[in-house]
Image: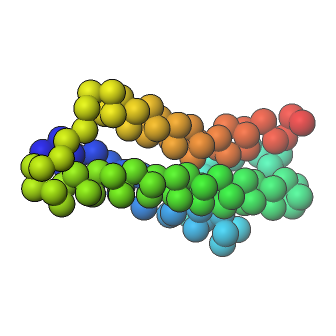
Amino acid sequence: MAYMFIFGCFCVLSVASLLAARVGYRGEVCNKSVGYDVPAEVKADPVLRKRADQLVAFWCTGAAVLSLAPLVPIGSVIMSGGGKSVSTWGLLVFALYGMAVVIVGAYPFEKIKHLGSD
């Protein structure tokens, strides 16, 4: 049951990252109804708007790709029907990896907050 939960978490993380990247590729990061809350100086400057879109598109695509990697080993454990398992250290590695993927996906949003002051 825990393996299904881990598998589901990484699937949800991948989909959420892809949806965020889609907003960046469409150039709608500064559009509050579709995108995200960004500082006023980023909304006002076309160069900063473009940079915000690029940041979200690049880093969220990276987070989506990174979140797909654990699906292979967890999927093989699930498909084995109980013949395989993951050690406690392995579960710790999955948790740390998941945190790293979340950090990669959150980076552009923190960077956007500081774009206007650079």
Residue that lies at the very extreme toward the bottom in this rendered image: 26
**Looking at the rendering, which quadrant does residue 26 occupy?**
bottom right
Residue drawn where x is 25% and y is 38% of the image: 86
**Looking at the rendering, which quadrant does residue 27 occupy?**
bottom right
Residue drawn where x is 84% and y is 53% of the image: 48
Q: Is residue 117 visible?
A: yes
Most foreground residue, 46 or 75: 75
Residue drawn where x is 80% and y is 49% of the image: 42
Most foreground residue, 66 or 16: 66
Image color mode: rainbow
Q: Is residue 94 above or below residue 79?
A: above
Q: Say left or right for 82 vs 4.
A: left
Residue 110 x/y as whole percent? 67, 37
Q: Where the N terminus falls, by quadrant?
A: top left
Most foreground residue, 54 or 50: 54
Q: Is residue 80 above or below residue 117?
A: below
Q: Is residue 99 above or below residue 15?
A: above
Residue 17 x/y as whole percent? 50, 56
Residue 96 x/y as whole percent? 44, 32
Q: Say left or right for 69 vs 80.
A: right
Most foreground residue, 89 or 21: 89
Residue 92 x/y as whole percent? 35, 29
Q: Is residue 30 visible?
A: no
Residue that lies at the very extreme toward the left in this rendered image: 82
* Count of all numbered marks drawn on residues in the image: 0
Q: Where the C terminus falls, by quadrant?
A: top right
Q: Say left or right for 105 vs 86.
A: right
